[in-house]
Image (tube, grey):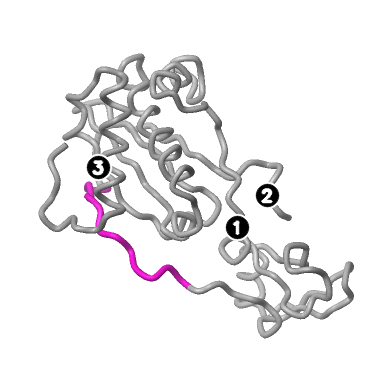
Amino acid sequence: MKHNSSISHPSALQIHEWIDFALDRNEVNYLSSMIRVRWNKRFVRRFADAGYIVNPPRGIIRVSPLIWERASETERRETIIHEACHIVAFHLHGTEIKPHGVEWRQAMENCEVKPDRCHNIPLIGINHFHVRECPKAKSERCSISRRRLGDMRQNGTLLHCLTCGLRVDLESLEFSSAPRSDPPLKNISSNAKSKSLWVSRDVSSRSALT
């Protein structure tokens, strides 16, 4: 894969190595120079997604820098390979296939990675926020969603927790610190005129909070 000279962060280099690994295992190495990666800070539940543009063939992988900071090396690797395999499947079998169908699963198996559709990375502080004074253990504290937080900021809404009995306002929430930096990644123009297809890897329902 050809790398832009501005890409110097270890995360960026590792991401492209994992993409190349997936392409090699599926015998489509020629796609390497056609795939670009970029961060998307709007992803607070979705770890990453992949887009495939048919004509000319090219792929885009977008990654959440917030969730990336929390993920283990294994979770990062599996997610990048997961998205690269979507591009592989769409390229080889067309865009009418099911996103997580047999073609994608086969591409994942070629990489010897379990074809899991969702991630289980905790989203407290990213998509949900703890109530600081909740008397429960930290791992079980009451929390509110980012959507509710937006309502509080925009409308001055106050909430009352039915579990611990506390009033919830902006001062009572516990926020995590922002990522230290955003590693530079290859960018691709977002104003592509040809038809594109997107598929994402979100948090699994069993770990999502309400």
Q: Which residue is mark 1?
A: 123
Mark linked to residue 138: none
Element assignment for label 3: strand
Mark linked to residue 36: 3
Q: CA distance from mark 1 to mark 3?
A: 26 Å
In terms of sequence position, does the residue under pointer 2 or pointer 3 come before the other? 3
Task: Judge whether residue 83 is colored magenta.
Answer: no
Q: Which residue is mark 2?
A: 208
Amino acid type for the residue under numbered disc 1: Leu
Q: Decide which of 9, 200 is in the foreground and name it.
A: 9
Residue at point 24% right, 48% down?
13
Element assignment for label 2: loop
Neighbour class for label 3 at 10 Å: few (<14), some, many (≥20)?
Answer: many
Taking the image as shown, residue 100 lies to the left or right of residue 28, namely: right
Taking the image as shown, residue 5 lies to the left or right of residue 63, namely: left
Q: Quadrant of residue 148?
A: bottom right
Task: Judge whether residue 184 is colored magenta.
Answer: yes
Magenta stretch, residue numbers? 178-190
Marks 1 and 2: CB-CB under 8 Å?
yes
Residue 68 picture location, percent across and down: 44, 54
**Main SS of residues in magenta:** loop
